[in-house]
């Protein structure tokens, strides 16, 4: 069955005690205001940035692992997208809450998440 996917955006993972100064730094550095200081669900701490290019989803996230930046790919069928990416050489690391954590053949981690607003942003790619 066909499914669709596209780049959703970037998550800035910050290993910090207080997320507010980290979000303020990235907001000022990127010239994008913090539009939602309580963007996290289920106890996760996220702050969403607004006025992003091409409606990309950009969040600053408090994490326990080392700081890094990762991208999210959104899909209307996350299992089909994870399988497609596995055929390209990625591997599934684990399912977390509502998304797949994946690892590219080159070692970078990224997530496959549910498509939020199919009609906004760049048109998604269609895959057989």
Image: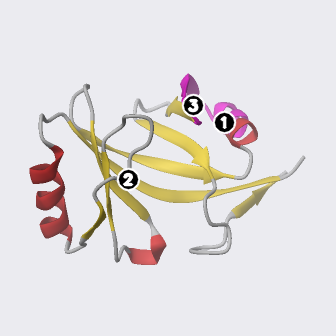
Q: Is residue 40 above or below residue 42?
A: below
Q: Which residue is mark 2?
A: 39
Could you tell me residue 102's position as x and y percent? 52, 31
Specify the quadrant of the image occupied by residue 97. Answer: top right
29 left or right of 86? left
Instruction: Verify CB contact (< 8 Å) between mark 3 and mark 1.
Output: yes
Please tell me whether mark 3 or mark 1 is closer to you in this view: 1
For the image, the number of numbered tags is: 3
Question: Which of label 2 and label 1 is nearer to you?
Answer: 2
Q: Is residue 76 left or right of residue 45?
A: right
Residue at x 37%, y 59% (from the top left corner): 58
Looking at marks 2 and 3 on the same chain, the residue that comes earlier in the sequence is marked by 2
Q: Residue under circle 3? A: 90
Q: First in sequence, mark 2 or 1: give its number.
A: 2
- Whichever of callouts 3 and 1 sits on the residue coming sooner in the sequence is 1
Q: Secondary structure at mark 1?
A: helix
Q: Position of residue 42 (x, y in %)?
A: 44, 35
Marker disc for residue 14: none
Q: Residue furthest top?
A: 93
Above or below, comparing residue 65 to residue 11 in the picture: above
- Magenta extent: 82-98
Q: How far is mark 2 from mark 3, CA to CA?
A: 28 Å
């Amino acid at each position: 069955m066909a499914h669709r996917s596209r780049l959703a955006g970037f998550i800035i993972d910050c290993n910090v005690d207080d997320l507010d100064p980290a979000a303020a730094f990235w907001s000022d550095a990127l010239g994008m205001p913090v539009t939602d200081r309580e963007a996290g669900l289920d106890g996760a701490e996220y702050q969403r940035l607004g006025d992003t290019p091409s409606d990309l989803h950009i969040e600053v996230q408090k994490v326990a692992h080392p700081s890094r930046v990762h991208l999210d790919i959104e899909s209307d069928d996350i299992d089909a997208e994870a399988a497609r990416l596995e055929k390209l050489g990625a591997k599934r690391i684990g399912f977390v809450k509502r998304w797949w954590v994946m690892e590219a053949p080159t070692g970078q981690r990224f997530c496959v998440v549910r498509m939020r607003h199919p009609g906004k942003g760049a048109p998604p790619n269609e895959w057989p």
